[in-house]
Image (tube, grey):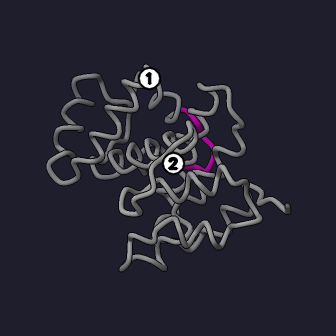
């Protein structure tokens, strides 16, 4: 299998409306991979490519991730393909593995950071406020973040602090 490099993946999404979002998801995935002692390159790649098909399926989101997986088949692992296919609730495919669950979480956390314009690491009470505000428009975001943090005993402020200090890609948290 000819695998896709991080550089190639970034190039593949460079014109996407989800470019900055995907880079943020990738940085979150990188930190999660370190936390769980998983393959950091594979997890970063999953984050970069998770919305590869977004612009082409924008009017039919129940295919989001499915189309990407078909386009990426043979270029990334089956684990990455399944994570991409199951990251959006509209496909009705359930996440099964830690990679699947982590991508769904990283995507939700990136959406929270973007929607709430989080530019610095918030205090715990601010995190709760952001989650409550977000749940009015997108209740699944809060649900995904809270359940993942609870299931994996993850401290959100610590994770966001690590993501913010990453200087790769030249983007700050949420930008």
Residue 15 % position (x, y):
56, 74
Between 42 and 156, the one lying in front of the other is 42
Q: Is residue 133 left or right of residue 96?
A: left
Is residue 167 on the magenta stretch? yes
State the separation of the CA atoms marked 2 and 1.
17 Å
Vertical comparison of 69 with 141: above or below? below
Vertical comparison of 28 with 60: above or below? above
Between 161 and 83, the one lying in front of the other is 83
Question: In the rendered structure, which segment of residues is drawn in magenta?
Answer: 165-171
User: Which residue is drawn at the image coordinates 59% and 54% (left, top)?
Assistant: 82
Q: Secondary structure at mark 1?
A: loop
User: Which residue is drawn at the image coordinates 43% and 19% (left, top)?
Assistant: 153
Vertical comparison of 89 with 174: above or below? below
Q: Is residue 70 left or right of residue 95?
A: right
Residue farthest along the right direction in this orientation: 1
Residue 60 % position (x, y):
38, 77
Q: Is residue 12 left or right of residue 142?
A: right
Is residue 26 on the magenta stretch? no
Residue 165 % position (x, y):
54, 32
Residue 55 % position (x, y):
47, 76
Quadrant housing residue 127: top left
Q: Which mark is residue 170?
A: none
Task: Please state which of the two labelled residues, at mark 2 or mark 1, is closer to the viewer.
Answer: 1
Q: Do the numbered discs 2 and 1 sit on residues whose CB atoms are within 8 Å? A: no
Q: Quadrant of the N terminus?
A: bottom right
Residue picked out by circle 1: 154
Between 155 and 165, the one lying in front of the other is 155
Residue picked out by circle 2: 25
Q: Earlier in the sequence, mark 2 or mark 1?
A: 2
Q: Residues within 10 Å of mark 2 (few under 14, many from 20)?
A: many
User: Which residue is drawn at the image coordinates 56% and 67% (left, top)?
Assistant: 52
Q: Secondary structure at mark 2?
A: helix
């Amino acid at each position: 299998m000819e695998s896709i490099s991080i550089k190639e993946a970034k190039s593949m999404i460079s014109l996407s409306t989800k470019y900055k979002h995907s880079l943020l998801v990738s940085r979150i995935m990188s930190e999660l991979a370190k936390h769980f002692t998983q393959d950091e390159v594979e997890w970063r790649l999953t984050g970069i490519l998770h919305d590869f098909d977004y612009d082409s399926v924008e009017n039919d989101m129940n295919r989001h991730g499915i189309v990407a997986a078909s386009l990426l088949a043979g270029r990334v692992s089956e684990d990455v393909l399944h994570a991409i296919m199951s990251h959006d609730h509209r496909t009705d495919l359930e996440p099964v593995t830690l990679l699947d669950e982590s991508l769904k979480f990283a995507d939700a956390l990136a959406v929270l950071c973007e929607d709430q314009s989080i530019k610095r690491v918030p205090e715990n009470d601010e995190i709760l406020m952001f989650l409550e505000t977000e749940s009015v428009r997108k209740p699944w975001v809060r649900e995904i973040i809270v359940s993942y943090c609870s299931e994996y005993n993850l401290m959100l402020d610590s994770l966001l602090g690590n993501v913010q200090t990453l200087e790769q890609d030249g983007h700050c948290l949420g930008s």
